[in-house]
């Protein structure tokens, strides 16, 4: 980025630069519009026009290295692999992982997480937690992006059950399983939340029974919110 003293007069005036930007935008808009109309009429088929992915009906597949939503990996017996060592929470720059450790029922393991919550509104998806974990207990290879639809903060806190469920879905339904599930969730929420007869939004508590992938603790039981609430002096 240029410093102010390095800018030319036209750059300092801003307006010429804004006009230049609008010229570029309008050029691409008119070019695409013309080409799409020409394609409809059977002309210029060899010239490609830009298209937009109509999400969520259409979507592009994420690449193999995509860093998506978290999951807690499972042992062969289906229990959580995490040993509550707190390394991920310590490495997390956003401080959005909350863990409560308990004594593990497995005599060969000292601890396991009674609670493990990620506040996805604070998470910056840097992957430090994955790198810090010494036992491959947390991964971000779910090939699904973070959920962007919720009604209040608690809808964006992902507890242990949700994080473990993603591992089960990945194992049972393959790479696209979690994304399919999230799109089903979006469709289900749209059906429940928007009542065309009343034309109004339902509140979270008025919605139907949660689906398996929607399992969330009661608001008072979400420690991640409480913790940040306390840190901020209860504001
Ligand atoms: S991805 Fe980064 S910000 Fe998010 S929980 Fe992991 S370490 Fe924290
Ligand atoms: S996910 Fe890994 S790093 Fe985090 S507490 Fe569990 S075992 Fe430790």
Image (tube, grey):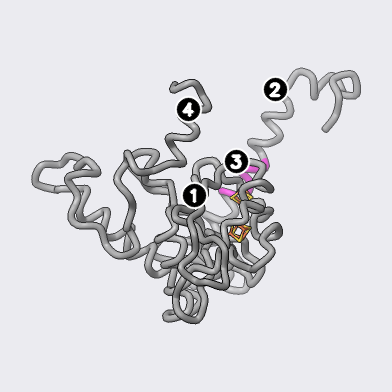
C-alpha gap between disc 4 and disc 3: 14 Å
Q: Residue at x 35, y 38 (%)?
A: 152
SS for dot 2: helix
Q: Are marks 2 and 1 in contact (CB under 8 Å)?
A: no
Magenta range: 24-29
SS for dot 4: helix
Residue highlighted by disc 3: 95
Tag 2 or tag 3, which sits nearer the N-term? 2
Residue 158: x, y in percent? 44, 52
C-alpha gap between disc 4 and disc 2: 47 Å
Residue in front for this viewpoint, 13 or 227: 227
Q: Crowdedness of circle 2 by 10 Å Cα count: few (<14), some, many (20+)?
A: few
Residue highlighted by disc 1: 100
Tag 3 or tag 4, which sits nearer the N-term? 3
Which label number is shown at residue 230? 4
Tag 4 or tag 1, which sits nearer the N-term? 1
Answer with the quarter of the image where residue 200 lies. Answer: top left
Tell whether 31 sits left or right of 145: right
Q: Nearer the viewer, mark 1 or mark 4?
A: 1
C-alpha gap between disc 1 and disc 4: 17 Å
C-alpha gap between disc 3 and disc 2: 42 Å
Residue highlighted by disc 2: 15
- Residue found farthest to the right: 6
Residue labelled 4 has its Cβ within 8 Å of some atom of ligand 1: no
């Amino acid at each position: 980025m240029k410093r102010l003293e390095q800018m030319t007069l036209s750059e300092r005036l801003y307006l010429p630069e804004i006009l230049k930007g609008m010229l570029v935008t309008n050029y691409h808009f008119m070019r695409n519009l013309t080409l799409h109309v020409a394609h409809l009429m059977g002309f210029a088929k060899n010239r490609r026009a830009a298209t937009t992915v109509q999400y969520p009906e259409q979507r592009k597949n994420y690449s193999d290295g995509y860093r998506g939503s978290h999951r807690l990996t499972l042992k062969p017996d289906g229990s959580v692999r995490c040993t509550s060592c707190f390394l991920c929470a310590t490495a997390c720059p956003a401080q959005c992982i909350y863990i409560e450790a308990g004594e593990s029922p497995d005599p060969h393991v000292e601890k396991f997480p009674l609670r493990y919550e990620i506040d996805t509104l604070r998470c910056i998806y840097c992957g430090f937690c994955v790198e810090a974990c010494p036992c491959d207990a947390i991964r971000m290879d779910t090939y699904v992006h973070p959920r962007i639809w919720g009604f209040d903060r608690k809808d964006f806190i992902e507890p242990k059950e949700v994080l473990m469920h993603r591992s089960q879905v990945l194992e049972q339904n393959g790479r696209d399983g979690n994304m399919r599930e999230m799109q089903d969730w979006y469709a289900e929420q749209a059906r429940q939340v928007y009542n065309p007869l009343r034309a109004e939004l339902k509140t979270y508590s008025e919605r139907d029974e949660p689906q398996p992938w929607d399992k969330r603790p009661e608001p008072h039981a979400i420690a991640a919110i409480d913790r940040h609430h306390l840190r901020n002096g209860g504001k």
